[in-house]
Image (tube, rainbow, N blue to C red):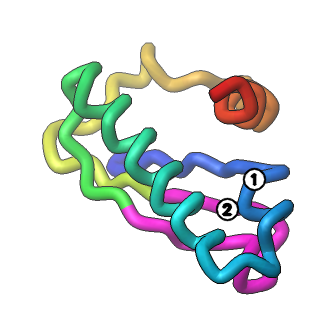
Amino acid sequence: KDHIIINVYDSLATQEKGNILAKNLCLLYLGIFNSIFDIIGIDVDGSEVECVLTGDEKCSYKFDLLSEEIDNALIDEHLSDAAVSDFLASL
C-alpha cells in the first residue's frame, strides 16, 4: 500500500530493440504514468525497475507514494495487465 507497480508487456521498445534511441520509449512511458498520477492528485516518485531492453520480459515501473497510503477500497483485487498495455497501444 506504499507503492504502485505498473507492468507493461509488449512495450513498443520491444519492437525497437536494435535502435539506440529505444530507451526514449521507456522514459516516455515513465513520463506518461507520472503525469497520470499528477493529474489525479497522487504524489509519487517513479522509477523503472525492469526493462525489455536489458533482457527482462516486461517493462516495470515502480511508483513510491509520497503521501498517505492508498485506501483498501481503492485497491483492485483483480489485476489486469491487459488494461494498461491496451491503453498504451492506443496512444
- Residue pictured at 59% horizontal, 23% vertical: 76
Residue at (24% x, 32% y) in the render: 38
Mark 1 or mark 2: whose residue is earlier in sequence = 1
Nearer to the camera, 66 or 13: 13
Instruction: Give 26 or 34, whichever is nearer the viewer.
Output: 26
Mark pair 1, 2: CA separation: 7 Å
Q: Is 89 on the left-hand or right-hand side of 63?
A: right
Residue at point 79%, 75% (across, down): 17
Callout 2 crowding tier (Cα within 10 Å): few <14, some 14–19, many ≥20: many
What residue sits 67% from the left and 62% below the top?
59
- Amino acid, disc 1: Ser
Q: Is residue 65 magenta?
A: no
According to the picture, the residue beneath numbered tag 1 turns out to be: 11
Q: Is residue 37 left or right of residue 86?
A: left
Position of 67 relative to 89 (above/below): below
What element does badge 1 sit on? loop
* Residue 14 sits above or below residue 54 on the image: above
Does the magenta segment cover residue 51?
A: yes
User: Which three-letter amino acid code belongs to the residue tagged 2?
Assistant: Cys
Against 16, is 32 above or below? above
Task: Residue 88 in the image: state x and y as whole percent.
Answer: 66, 34
What residue did someone put label 2 on?
59
- CB atoms of marks 1 and 2 within 8 Å: yes
Provide the residue span drawn in magenta: 47-61
Q: Quadrant of residue 41?
A: top left
Image location of residue 77, percent across then percent down: 65, 25
